[in-house]
Image (cartoon, grey):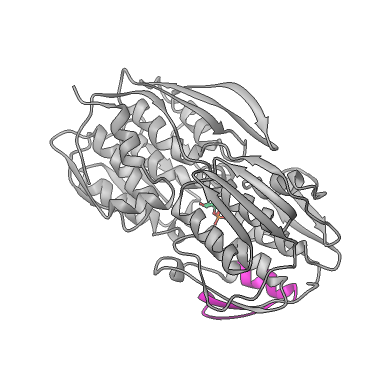
Amino acid sequence: MHIRPAKLVRGAIALPGDKSISHRAAIIAAMADGETRIDNFASSVDCAATLECLKKLGVRIRQEGATVWVVGVGKSGFQAPDKPLDCGNSGTTMRLMAGVLAGQEFETVLTGDASLRQRPMKRVIEPLSRMGARFESAEGKAPLTIYGRNPLKSTEYHLPIASAQIKSSILLAGLNSDGETAVVENVPTRDHTERMLRWFGVDVRETGSGGVKKISLTGEERLSAAQLFIPSDISSAAFFIVAALGLAGSTLSMQNVGLNPTRTGVIEALTLFGADIRRVNRREVNNEPVGDILVAGDLAAASEKVLRGGLIANLIDELPILAILGTQLESGLEVRDAGELRVKETDRIAAVVENLRRMSADVEEFDDGFRVGKSQLKGARVDSYGDHRIAMAFSIAGLLATGGATEIDGAECVDVSFPGFFETLQNVVVYE
Ligand code: S3P
């Protein structure tokens, strides 16, 4: 893919349904009694992998465009698959499905592509084993063989890593446990699972103080089918927002974007960096805050130049594109406490640093993050490393560059979260 330097971006953008929420909608609908209709289901390849896994477990699923109907089998009514389940590139599919399968009385193998088979799974194996499921894996990496049991033993688990995938995996397993299962988090992580379970009638309780939150449910709960509309994905919006901020004179609007406060860290951070981002027409759909986003180009002076600590979990997927924005800020940008980036679809710290260097940026690498100084990016050949968010972040970098086109190797991986990304970009870019 070749990206030419642009003058500005302008127009209205239709974004795909949120990937995180779509995974949960499909999985939780499959655990319910009755048929659920899901509108604006994510077009992402990752979410298609979740649907395929569920079908192989005996769930009847029908799809027409962005509408999906799921006939639930009940929380322990899945059927043993005759083959390994392929989670593709999707960590969310593997970790959440591990929680569901831990409570099914049969053996399943979960596998995935070369990237997913390198990613750490001990983080779910450990708590789910404590609940009584048995796992076989080589060094905590997929393929994972899961020997489920029902009921599981209830547990209280303190998250050692700020991860919504681990939290969700345990809560889904908890639905098949023999008592109250609780997850304690010190840092807030995205709470789509809790909101979605409540929408399906589950009593998910939250207690806590001083930033420590205990989320609990019991194995008595049953889930009832529901109707859902999936908001547009704020993580996909972030690429376009940064394009507008980096190109003076730009104006963009995006409708029905998910504005869950555990996901809007990117907007909060960009506002600290001097951005003018308005959230209008705010409302709730199926327990999720939603609204329209209006963004105008140009950045005022930044009041902050370091992102670290508890904020990181709230914008973890947006850090590659925030690195690109950092090259446009007078103050530059430093990101710390983000070691988790090293175990995403690729090592995103290494990928960001290497590609920014190729584009002549001033950049420094840390174990747990990076620092970028204000830089004039130059068109260059960069690599997606097979990671959708790296491909999209460097597409935006290409728009902001001078001195010729940016060539992105392996750009087709954008389909993992945003099929049609390049067409959408093309529709709003003005070159002269
Ligand atoms: C996700 C949680 C985050 C995020 C990922 C999606 C989810 O991962 O990076 O893209 O849907 O729960 P972790 O739970 O590993 O932090």
Q: Residue 274's x, y, as percent?
A: 44, 23
For the record, the magenta segment spans 124-146
Q: Specify the quadrant of the image occupied by residue 115.
A: bottom left
Q: Residue 212's x, y, as percent?
A: 73, 48
Rendered position, 381 above or below 321: below
Judge by depth and name the residue closer to the eye, 417 or 384.
417
Magenta stretch: includes residue 84: no
Q: Residue 404's x, y, as percent?
A: 13, 37
Q: Residue 213's x, y, as percent?
A: 75, 48
Q: Residue at x 43, y 25 (%)?
A: 302
Judge by depth and name the residue closer to the eye, 280 or 361.
280
Rendered position, 302 above or below 395: above
Residue 163 visible in image:
no
Q: Residue at x 72, y 64 (%)?
A: 173
Q: Residue at x 62, y 36 (%)?
A: 261
Q: Specify the quadrant of the image occupied by residue 78.
A: bottom right
Is 144 placed left or right of 366 in the picture?
A: right
Is 23 placed left or right of 357 in the picture?
A: right
Residue 242 visible in image:
yes
Residue at the extreme left of the image, as rendered: 403
